Amino acid sequence: MATYKIQEKELQSVFENLLKKNIVEGIMVQKKGEHGIFPVLITDPDLLEGITPSAPLFSFNRAVLLQNNGCRKLAVVVNPCEARAINELKKLNQIDMDNLIVISGDCLGTFDPKDVQMDSTSPENIAEKKSELRTACTVCEHFTPPEVDIAIYGIGVDGGLVLSTDREELLEGLSLTPGEPSANRDAEIKKILDEHLAAKEKMVSGISETLSTTDGTIELFKHCIRCDNCRDVCPICYCKVCYFQTPLGDLKTDDMVNQASIKGLLRIPPDILFYHLTRNIHVAPGCVECGACEEACPRDIPLLPVWKALASDVQSIFDYIAGMEKEVPLPLVQFKEDEFED
Ligand code: SF4
Ligand code: SF4
Ligand code: SF4
């Protein structure tokens, strides 16, 4: 693994190198424009001027855009929860990693651009806005890059950043200075993690108990209108045709009349609980706890606490953390004879 000390403004030359050497045809990165900072896809190296790769913004999990990537080679600069979703989708055969270079950095939390106008990405400006961080970020346990092609470390680095990669060919031609994070990095990560774990504990307290009963679960989801937003923005809900879009799941009025006539009454929209339980079963082993679903919910259903509790419970049973490593197999595709003996 090679590591180099770099200043943030030098990242532009790293991306420029990838484009100019035709290693990739485009780079997905954030850039400041007339209306604020937004993710863009840049193919012209001259238009890299003004990029803001470390702007702490999150409007949706960009891994959803990469499902079924074609043969055009791209580099993407994403947050760790997005990089984990990409790794997870790779294992589900939804992303061809041969055509994708994933770059991800330490993440001290992100803001929703609809709530926070990011004029400057300076640490002072970010610290000032800390109370407006996305809720998912205040309880995030995996805020450092998972296994990616190029990792960018900022935590525990004195003055600047450290690039880390085992694909040195991606940096060929650049004159970079070797360097490493300081010895404090692990301690600084632990300090942040402890804060987030305490906040998570508070968030999920009672939720597993609520979810363990039918009444509690109904209560939790009772205001859901089955708009399906939580499914559509979720990178891990990847089925091409969701059951709830098929004639069996997507009930028309005649079907609802048939169902109503069984008991004489049907709660509408139908199948709210069935919808959420289906999503819970399908997504829990791979949920990356990005919070995109809760933010997309028009009814303020507390989806994040549900997923924080479920994903942790399910993934810890399998000693698995979704998307942290590229090659560790998905828990539900392995059969171990000695599993769950008790
Ligand atoms: S959930 Fe974690 S990785 Fe994702 S944006 Fe927030 S702090 Fe970063
Ligand atoms: S269920 Fe929600 S928190 Fe989990 S990966 Fe999907 S969108 Fe992110
Ligand atoms: S986004 Fe909210 S209202 Fe829409 S289906 Fe999901 S939980 Fe229900």
Image: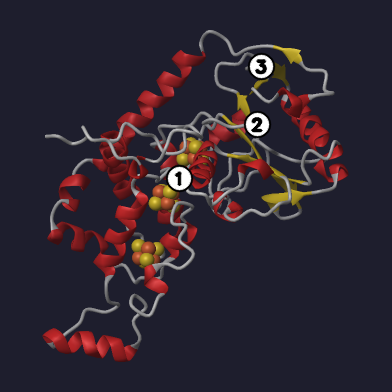
Q: Could you say where residue 119 lies in the image, as x and y percent from the top left? A: 68, 43
- Foreground: 36 or 90? 90
Horizontally, is 171 left or right of 282 in the view? right
Compute the Cα span from label 3 to label 2. 24 Å
Q: Position of residue 177 (x, y in %)?
A: 76, 13
Ligand 1 under 8 Å from disc 2 Cβ: no
Q: Is residue 239 above or below residue 75?
A: below
Tag in front: 2 or 1:
1
Q: Quadrant of the N terminus?
A: top right
Q: In percent of the image, x 37 and y 27: which residue is there?
A: 195
Decide: few, some or many residues near mark 3? Use Cα within 10 Å; few <14, some 14-19, many ≥20: many
* Secondary element type, mark 2: loop
Q: Residue at x 59, y 13 (%)?
A: 181
What residue is rendered at 75% in x and 41% in y? Answer: 51
Q: Which residue is mark 3?
A: 3
The residue at which mark 2 appears reads as: 122
Q: Residues within 10 Å of mark 2 (few under 14, many from 20)?
A: few
Q: Tell me residue 149's x, y (percent).
A: 63, 31
Query: Disc 2 marks which amino acid?
Result: Ser
Query: Of callouts 3 and 2, which one flags the residue occurring earlier in the amino acid sequence?
Result: 3
Farthest front residue in view: 337
User: Looking at the rendering, in which quadrant would you find the C terminus?
Assistant: top left
Residue 149 located left or right of residue 128: right
Please say if the residues under marks 2 and 1 sit with CB atoms less than 8 Å apart.
no
Which amino acid lies under the numbered mark 1 shown in the image of this protein? Cys
> Which residue: 31% across, 47% down?
305
- Is ligand 2 less than 8 Å from the beta carbon at label 1? yes
Q: Which residue is mark 1?
A: 290
79 w.r.t. 233: above or below: above
Q: Residue furthest top?
A: 183
